[in-house]
């Protein structure tokens, strides 16, 4: 595949890194713009009144070259890692754009990223920020980027198809999470209000994709909602559900590896900390535990500093929906109302309650046409795959299915396609 001049270049970087050096880098790149080799885009192109999220995603999906100015701050950004890097990597392995990682500040990249050649040098210890001569290292970068652009426009670069990743086992993109993501806005803290821990309650079954939803939201949507973009996003911590309201806080402190008497700066690391807990069913005893936590959070000792966020994710799971869809749906609705009333009684704590969706038949069939799937199926097999997905629903006799049985059926289908060599 050949690319046409000028190449559209997307520059991805952390605002926490040296802004002056970034401007110098862009100034050097203008020489390639003058020669009509590239056209540069970064979020600094977004002017007042524009939707920044839409502008970034549009530029991501149109770029030919993705320049990643990597650092520890870059990697800690939920939006960069969850949206920009994920999209760029998918397009890179599909041959639609070329990812060029730059060691902007010294750090240890994850193994997948280390498989790519970094600029400015072959060794990871060569970074731009700490170079003795900034002019020299920026000049080297421009020369190498010019060479990369020449390879692409002359058709001498192609994605290594053998390096394509396998389809993810959880298939989280099957669920329609539009409404749940909108409901996350209830976690926003009004300007001027004291910052308190937040509460996200997910209601569903063991067949739903709660873990996948939390993982996606934690990296992409929650940092935006909680005003935590640019701050580190930490791995979730796990908390047992206490059996007595008197011990609610002690279980939370244990999950945070913290003592009750510590200051909040010592209890929580800088950034977004997520604590996850799961309970089966719901009753008055468990409601009393949760209410005790919410009451305590309104105290001054739980006021969060500006650089720290705490979110408790509570999953309330019942038996599988497949066993009795009507009874299960009614039970989930009753639990949703009970928890909503509890949250309303404890105003002042940012909270939202979400009943997880089942997968619509149309969403599942459309899955066969997603880029992640199309890139791995031969063109003549895609319609067959969509037809086989319809058959999964026909056997279930339902227009909706829980996540887990549907994902299992899809993986079996893909394995059959792989064995007959019509899918990678």
Image (cartoon, rainbow, N blue to C red):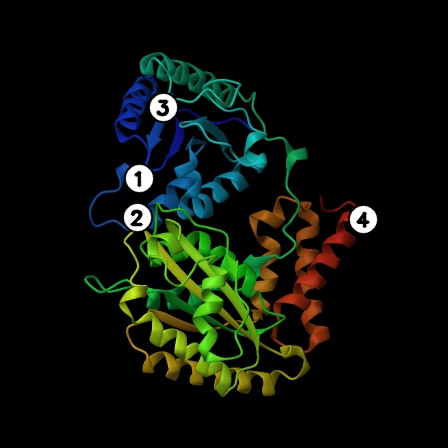
Classify mark 2: helix, strand or loop: helix
The earlier-in-sequence mark between 2 and 1 is 1
Q: Is residue 36 above or below residue 355?
A: above
Q: Say few, some or many: other residues with alpha carbon within 10 Å of mark 3 (under 14 / 14 to 19 / 20 or more).
A: some
- Report the residue at 37% width, 66% height from top: 198
Whether residues under marks 2 and 1 lie with C-beta atoms below 8 angstroms apart, the answer is yes
Q: Nearer the viewer, mark 4 or mark 2?
A: 2
Residue 163 spot, x, y in % from top left: 65, 35
Q: Say few, some or many: other residues with alpha carbon within 10 Å of mark 1 (under 14 / 14 to 19 / 20 or more).
A: some
The earlier-in-sequence mark between 3 and 4 is 3
Q: Which residue is mark 3?
A: 129
Whether residues under marks 4 and 2 lie with C-beta atoms below 8 angstroms apart, the answer is no
Most extreme residue toward the front is 261
The earlier-in-sequence mark between 4 and 2 is 2
Quarter of the image where one finds residue 272: bottom left
Classify mark 1: helix, strand or loop: helix
Residue 214 placement, left or right of 59: right
Residue 244 spot, x, y in % from top left: 50, 80
Classify mark 3: helix, strand or loop: loop
Q: Which residue is mark 4?
A: 419
- What is the spatial separation of the Cα atoms under label 4 and label 2, in whole angstroms? 44 Å
Residue 336 visible somewhere in the drawing: no
Q: Nearer the viewer, mark 1 or mark 3?
A: 3
Quarter of the image where one finds residue 81: top left
Q: Which residue is mark 2?
A: 52
Q: Say few, some or many: other residues with alpha carbon within 10 Å of mark 2 (under 14 / 14 to 19 / 20 or more).
A: some
Q: Which residue is mark 1?
A: 43
- Report the residue at 56% width, 24% height from top: 157
Q: Nearer the viewer, residue 27 or 268?
A: 268
- Report the residue at 49% width, 31% height from top: 99
- What is the spatial separation of the Cα atoms under label 1 and label 3, in whole angstroms? 21 Å
Whether residues under marks 1 and 4 lie with C-beta atoms below 8 angstroms apart, the answer is no
């Amino acid at each position: 595949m050949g690319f046409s001049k000028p190449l559209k270049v997307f520059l991805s970087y952390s605002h926490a890194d040296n802004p002056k050096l970034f401007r110098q880098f862009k100034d050097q790149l203008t020489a390639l713009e003058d020669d009509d080799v590239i056209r540069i885009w970064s979020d600094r192109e977004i002017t007042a009144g524009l939707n920044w999220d839409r502008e970034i995603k549009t530029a991501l999906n149109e770029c030919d070259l993705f320049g990643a100015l990597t650092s520890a701050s870059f990697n800690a950004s939920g939006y960069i890692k969850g949206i920009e890097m994920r999209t760029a990597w998918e397009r890179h392995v599909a041959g639609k754009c070329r990812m060029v990682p730059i060691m902007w500040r010294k750090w240890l990249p994850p193994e997948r990223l280390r498989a790519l050649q970094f600029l400015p040098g072959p060794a990871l210890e060569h970074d731009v920020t700490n170079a003795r001569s900034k002019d020299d290292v920026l000049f080297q970068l421009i020369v190498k980027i010019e060479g990369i652009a020449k390879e692409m426009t002359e058709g001498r670069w192609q994605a290594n198809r053998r390096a394509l990743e396998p389809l993810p086992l959880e298939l989280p993109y099957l669920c329609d999470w539009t409404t749940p993501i909108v409901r996350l806005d209830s976690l926003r803290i009004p300007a001027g209000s004291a910052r308190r821990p937040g509460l996200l309650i997910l209601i569903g079954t063991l067949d739903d994709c709660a873990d996948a939803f939390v993982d996606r939201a934690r990296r992409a949507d929650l940092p935006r909602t909680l005003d935590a973009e640019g701050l580190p996003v930490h791995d979730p911590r796990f908390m047992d559900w206490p059996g007595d309201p008197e011990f609610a806080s002690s279980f939370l402190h244990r999950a945070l590896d913290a003592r009750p008497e510590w200051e909040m700066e010592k209890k929580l690391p800088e950034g977004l900390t997520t604590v996850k807990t799961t309970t089966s069913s719901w009753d008055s005893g468990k409601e009393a535990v949760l209410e005790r936590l919410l009451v305590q959070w309104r105290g001054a000792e739980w006021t969060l500093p500006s650089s720290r966020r705490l979110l408790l994710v509570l999953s309330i799971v019942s038996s599988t929906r497949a066993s009795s869809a009507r009874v299960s749906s009614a039970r989930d609705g009753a639990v949703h109302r009970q928890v909503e009333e509890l949250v309303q009684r404890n105003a002042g704590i940012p909270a939202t309650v979400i009943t997880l969706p089942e997968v619509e038949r149309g969403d599942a069939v459309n899955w066969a046409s997603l880029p992640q799937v199309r890139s791995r199926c031969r063109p003549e097999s895609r319609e067959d795959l969509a037809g086989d997905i319809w058959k999964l629903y026909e056997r279930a006799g339902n227009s909706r299915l829980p996540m887990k049985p549907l994902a299992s059926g899809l993986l079996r289908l893909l394995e059959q396609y792989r064995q007959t060599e019509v899918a990678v």
